[in-house]
Image (cartoon, coloured by chain):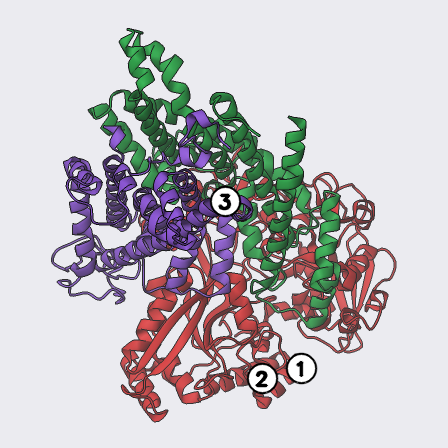
Chain colours: A green, B purple, C red
């Protein structure tokens, strides 16, 4: 097992990350507009002083090697935009926020999604099925930049139940709306996947056999059907988890949540090179990690698949 | 690599994800395209036509497409003509602003239909690009196998761990904002799943007898990929493509939200929605009409996709 | 009539008087019933790049700097310069040397006195190339402080800057040549004193809560990037007795709709400058008209022509496009939050400026358009050979709207085809700096309240002259104005400069900006500062 993990790390994760860093490093430097361009043009001497401070006056390869050297020490460098902080400061302050928000949305999405999917599958082609799947489909097709203002309008301004934004260290009432907006898409997708695979499993011979033996329906569902039906869901969870955590750009901007989504967009728009690189590495590493986790989980649930 | 007792299709993750179809049995025996009698395709068509939701969706979608293409003709308004005395005006028949006007007093009916044209085009072309690249890439990797396969898959994984949004922002800022670039950008980042699915299918197909037979007969590798592998994965490709169109349309709307969508005075449903979401209260029709069109269209695509999958997957019913 | 009151401060006698008044900080009218909790939440538009005043980049940063720190001079609620840490000042040697007397009661938030050495340290730090401040040029170019430019260029060490502490309470500033409006430039957000001991102890981390020592009415309590900045009353502030608000929270909300929603849910008491979402304007006017507060701002929104690209070297084309634009419609109907149509570049409200009127200003729109058609025809444009060009603007709802309207207005007069090109902010700046545009959106907000901050843009040597307008006659007038000490003469020179611009049309002036906020009815004490600054120390909350 340890050998396996080590091999994955050395042969797969690290080279992938290295390619990622390299490509991003040079791509972002090709993007028009520099980190320090602003509406009021600075005299060239001032620009030169700034470039010198941030090592931008060195040739690109030298900057690249310098960056890799810092990276090896775990240093993402200074933020070009937020001058009071290093990228490490900012990222490590934002990660717990996005994680907390993402984890809640993830749990809600998984629980509600699977429950909805199973319910729909058990009553296939009934009105229950149609209404559950209809709602789920709205969730798939409704962009969250539409849902966020609508929910804020109803629950914050109309009913005055919840605040219209803010984070306040993640107090529950501040989290409800962002979580709702964030998880809607994933609930829908999970419900659809669950329903599909559940129907497939319920129609398969071993379930028919179990039914023929006269086993109670609930028992069949729990002992036989659920496990195989959840396989496709699980393989979706890896990307979904990363997606939820990093993809909360709209939610974070709208509700004013200090997470990595906002950092990332601002980083790209401000040409904050170290910030974009740092977050790219982080997101890349997360993606690789969760894909590996899913792979292992998959092995536990489906004994037919052996990791080699 | 998989335990033999569960051949032919011990699932990989991605195959499972996409609910893979077994290779089409009708084509196993026939190498030519002239299929006589009750072919699989005829069967599938019959099953599809029996699916009321899918059929209704097909009809509605056709209506929407026709409306987008020709619906603006009877309106007296141009899509880009502002009217500073009639901004944010509610729908009315006497002004011929059937859907009301937007923040510049432009007619929303005409703009919604124009936006539909762009959105549907982005969706269809984006999906086409994704399908073309994905199918060929996946089929090639799966068929050639070995080192080539693992290099190609490694490349895929690197792309997959690249933050998509950032890539798109970069692309858009590099190359200005041409409409075709939006198709390309969107298509170029969404072929990855397609490639994985097709590769999985190809892996299980290439051990089939008819492929062995073709190989023995001396058909070239490229010939086998294009003549035998690709036609056999077309079913799943078709299903995936119909599901890809709505996600393309949604992705375009996300780009519009970031201000990276189509160039004004052109518009898309995403751009209209983004605009409408800002004035929900002051002018709810600005959100309502484009949203209704978008949601209906996406619903239809999803139902058609589901219908196709059920129709092409005989073991389901 | 436009005799600038602020220039009265030039005489030391008047300055001494001003010191005695001390008429700022919250002026609560007698009989006002104050709310028991004096806390306020304000929008700040975006996350400030830094809380270090010397490294300030623009409004979001200087908004924070002037709350936390206080410079030699400061502004009253209506934007007049009043004494800050300096209680009086006088000039010597024909305005080449200035002596500032610092008040002895001024203290840092740790209780230690604010001295002239703190200012000397701060100003030298700001021009030091090692600090890499984006405003490093300001002391040399805007204030003409001795050696300012040479230090920025790296030719002279920072220690040679013409700023010197003569004892703890006297600061001497030496200029290269006299600047009539020096005092106005000193209210800039980057020219605050900074705490040397904290900077030397904590380095770049000195701006963190707990590390920061400040000398303004407030001190930093909490900072969460992209969420909020909380400041609390600084008990050591010399005028603390006059401060009413105990705690102020700034929220860096970029999305105006989001800010508006939170304002309506009572999560915000005062939105950021410009924090009035245009799409909700109709509703705001209907439901909360009293909460929409606007007044003129020193800034101009315009389109700039690129003189390097044909046919924009042809004055007929430039003039035709300028005449054809219905600026009244754009300012009043399309934007409609107190903006005024712009016929000249300098806002009429600028101190030391007296507006001139152009002949076409009085024409009807129909007559202007007739003239525009005639000019275009004379320049050789017809249906068969239309004028085709690209209009560049940066991605933003409001800019999009105005560009669409402008394109339509131009198309209306005849053979004109406009292609709209929007680019994301940094790309836009890059295109404009490289001169890769034909006609581009352009806007300028004053750095200080004086016409030169606007008119200098058209000087051929100015770094922001993106259209590369070049008129030696204009340059000569602006150079002369800069060193003219007589206020009336200077006003006349600025008018001459505007007359040249009115002949050459380097820009299509669209409108003059307004300051605009949504402010809850219980917030009082703000004035109409044309530079847009609203200091929390001037505010108070009435019972509600």
Packing grade of label 1 (10 A; few <14, some 14-19, many >=20) is: some
Q: Which residue carries the number 2 mark?
A: C493
SS class, disc 3: loop
Task: Give the chain of mark 2.
Answer: C
Q: Are marks 1 and 2 in contact (CB under 8 Å)?
A: yes
Give the Cα distance between marks 1 and 2: 9 Å
Q: Do circles 2 and 3 both sit on a common chain?
A: no
Q: Quadrant of the C terminus of chain A?
A: top right
Q: Which residue carries the number 1 mark?
A: C484
Q: Residue at x 36, y 51 (%)?
A: B274
Packing grade of label 3 (10 A; few <14, some 14-19, many >=20) is: some
Q: Are marks 3 and 1 in contact (CB under 8 Å)?
A: no
Packing grade of label 2 (10 A; few <14, some 14-19, many >=20) is: many
Residue that extends furthest to the right in the rendered view of this protein? C167
Residue A99 — which label? none
User: Could you say which quadrant of the image residue A123 lies in?
Assistant: top left
Residue that extends furthest to the front in the rendered view of this protein? B217
In depth, the one of C436 and C478 nearer the eye is C436
């Amino acid at each position: 097992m340890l050998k396996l993990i080590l091999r994955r790390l050395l042969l797969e994760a690290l080279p992938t990350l290295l390619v990622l860093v390299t490509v991003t490093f040079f791509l972002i430097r090709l993007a028009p507009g520099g980190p320090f361009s602003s509406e009021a043009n600075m005299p060239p001497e001032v620009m030169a002083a700034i470039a010198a401070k941030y090592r931008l006056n060195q040739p690109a390869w030298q900057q690249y090697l310098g960056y890799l050297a810092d990276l090896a020490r775990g240093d993402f460098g200074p933020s070009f935009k937020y001058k009071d902080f290093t990228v490490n400061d900012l990222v490590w302050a934002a990660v717990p926020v996005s994680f907390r928000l993402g984890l809640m949305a993830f749990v809600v999405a998984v629980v509600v999604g699977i429950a909805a999917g199973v319910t729909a599958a058990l009553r296939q082609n009934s009105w229950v099925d149609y209404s559950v799947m209809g709602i789920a489909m709205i969730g798939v097709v409704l962009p969250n930049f539409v849902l966020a203002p609508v929910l804020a309008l109803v629950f914050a301004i109309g009913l005055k139940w919840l605040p219209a934004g803010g984070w306040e260290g993640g107090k529950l009432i501040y989290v409800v709306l962002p979580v709702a907006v964030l998880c809607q898409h994933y609930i829908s997708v999970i419900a659809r996947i669950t329903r599909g695979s559940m129907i497939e499993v319920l129609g398969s011979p071993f379930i028919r056999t179990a039914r023929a033996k006269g086993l109670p329906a609930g028992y069949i569902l729990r002992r036989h059907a659920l496990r195989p039906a959840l396989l496709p869901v699980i393989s979706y969870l890896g990307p979904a988890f990363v997606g939820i955590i990093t993809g909360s750009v709209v939610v974070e901007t709208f509700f004013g949540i200090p997470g990595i989504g906002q950092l990332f967009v601002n980083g790209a728009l401000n040409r904050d090179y170290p910030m974009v690189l740092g977050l790219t590495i982080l997101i890349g590493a997360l993606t690789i990690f969760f894909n590996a986790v899913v792979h292992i989980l998959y092995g536990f649930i489906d004994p037919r698949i052996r990791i080699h | 690599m998989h335990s033999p007792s569960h051949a032919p299709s011990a699932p990989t993750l991605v195959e499972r994800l996409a609910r893979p179809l077994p290779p089409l049995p009708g084509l196993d025996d026939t190498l030519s395209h002239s299929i006589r009698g009750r072919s699989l395709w005829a069967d599938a068509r019959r099953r599809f036509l029996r699916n009321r939701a899918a059929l209704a969706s097909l009809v509605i979608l056709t209506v929407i497409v026709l409306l987008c293409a020709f619906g603006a003709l009877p309106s007296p308004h141009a899509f880009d003509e502002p009217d500073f005395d009639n901004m944010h005006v509610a729908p009315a028949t006497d002004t011929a602003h059937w859907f009301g006007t937007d923040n510049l007093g432009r007619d929303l009916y005409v703009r919604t239909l124009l936006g539909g044209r762009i959105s549907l085009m982005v969706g269809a072309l984006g999906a086409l690009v994704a399908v073309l690249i994905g199918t060929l890439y996946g089929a090639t990797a799966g068929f050639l196998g070995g080192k080539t396969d693992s290099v190609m898959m490694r490349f895929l994984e690197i792309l997959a761990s690249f933050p998509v949004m950032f890539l798109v922002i970069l692309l858009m800022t590099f190359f200005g904002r041409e409409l075709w670039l939006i198709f390309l950008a969107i298509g170029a980042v969404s072929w990855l799943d397609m490639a994985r699915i097709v590769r999985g299918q190809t892996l299980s197909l290439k051990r089939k007898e008819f492929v062995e037979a073709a190989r023995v007969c001396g058909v070239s590798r490229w010939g086998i990929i294009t003549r035998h592998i690709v036609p056999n994965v077309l079913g799943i490709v078709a299903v995936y493509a119909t599901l890809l169109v709505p996600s393309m349309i949604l992705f375009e709307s996300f780009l519009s939200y970031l201000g990276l969508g189509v160039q004004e005075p052109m518009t898309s449903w995403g751009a209209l929605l983004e605009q409408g979401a800002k004035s929900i209260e002051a002018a709810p029709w600005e959100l309502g009409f484009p949203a209704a069109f978008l949601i209906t269209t996406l619903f239809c695509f999803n139902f058609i996709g589901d219908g196709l999958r059920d129709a092409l997957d005989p073991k389901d019913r | 009539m436009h005799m600038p009151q602020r220039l009265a401060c030039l005489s030391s006698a008047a300055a001494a008087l001003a010191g005695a008044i001390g008429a700022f900080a919250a002026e609560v009218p007698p009989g006002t019933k104050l709310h028991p909790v004096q806390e306020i939440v304000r929008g700040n538009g975006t996350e400030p790049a830094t809380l270090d005043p010397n490294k300030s980049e623009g409004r979001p940063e200087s908004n924070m700097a002037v709350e936390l720190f206080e410079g030699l001079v400061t502004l009253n609620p209506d934007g007049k310069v009043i004494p800050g840490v300096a209680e009086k000042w006088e000039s010597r040697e024909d305005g080449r040397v200035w002596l500032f007397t610092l008040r002895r009661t001024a203290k840092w938030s740790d209780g230690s006195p604010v001295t002239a050495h703190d200012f000397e340290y701060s100003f030298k730090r700001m021009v030091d190339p090692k600090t890499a401040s984006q405003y490093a040029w300001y002391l040399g170019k805007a204030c003409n402080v001795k050696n300012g430019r040479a230090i920025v260029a790296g030719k002279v060490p920072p220690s040679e800057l013409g700023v010197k502490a003569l004892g703890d309470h006297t600061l001497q500033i030496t200029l290269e040549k006299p600047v009539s409006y020096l005092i106005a430039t000193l209210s800039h957000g980057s020219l605050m004193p900074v705490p040397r001991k904290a900077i030397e102890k904590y380095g770049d981390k000195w701006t963190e809560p707990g590390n920061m020592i400040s000398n303004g009415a407030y001190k930093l309590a909490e900072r969460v990037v992209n969420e909020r900045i909380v400041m609390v009353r600084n008990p050591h502030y010399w005028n603390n007795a006059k401060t009413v608000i105990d705690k102020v929270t700034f929220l860096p909300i970029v999305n105006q709709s989001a800010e508006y929603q939170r304002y309506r849910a009572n999560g915000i008491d005062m939105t950021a400058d410009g924090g009035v979402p245009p799409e909700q304007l109709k509703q705001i006017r209907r439901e909360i008209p009293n909460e929409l507060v606007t007044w003129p701002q020193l800034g101009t929104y315009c389109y700039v022509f690129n003189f390097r690209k044909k046919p924009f070297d042809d004055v007929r084309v430039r003039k035709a496009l300028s005449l054809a634009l219905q600026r009244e419609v754009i300012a009043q109907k399309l934007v409609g939050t107190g903006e005024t149509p712009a016929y000249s570049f300098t806002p009429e409200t600028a101190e030391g400026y007296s507006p001139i009127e152009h002949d076409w200003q009085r024409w009807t729109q129909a007559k202007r358009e007739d003239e525009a058609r005639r000019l275009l025809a004379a320049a050789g444009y017809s249906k068969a050979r239309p004028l085709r060009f690209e209009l560049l603007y940066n991605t933003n709802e409001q800019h999009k709207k105005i560009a669409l309207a402008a394109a339509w207005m131009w198309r209306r007069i005849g053979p004109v085809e406009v292609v709209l090109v929007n680019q994301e902010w940094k790309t836009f700046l890059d295109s404009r700096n490289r001169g890769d545009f034909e006609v581009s959106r352009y806007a300028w907000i004053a750095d200080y309240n004086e016409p030169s901050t606007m008119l200098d843009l058209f000087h051929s040597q100015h770094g922001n002259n993106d259209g590369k307008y070049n008129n030696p006659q204009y340059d000569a007038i602006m150079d002369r104005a800069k060193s003219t000490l007589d206020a009336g003469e200077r006003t006349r020179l600025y008018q001459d400069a505007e007359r040249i611009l009115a002949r050459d049309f380097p820009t299509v002036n669209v409108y003059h900006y307004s300051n605009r906020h949504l402010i809850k009815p219980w917030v009082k004490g703000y004035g109409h500062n044309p530079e847009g600054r609203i200091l929390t120390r001037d505010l108070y909350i009435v019972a509600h």
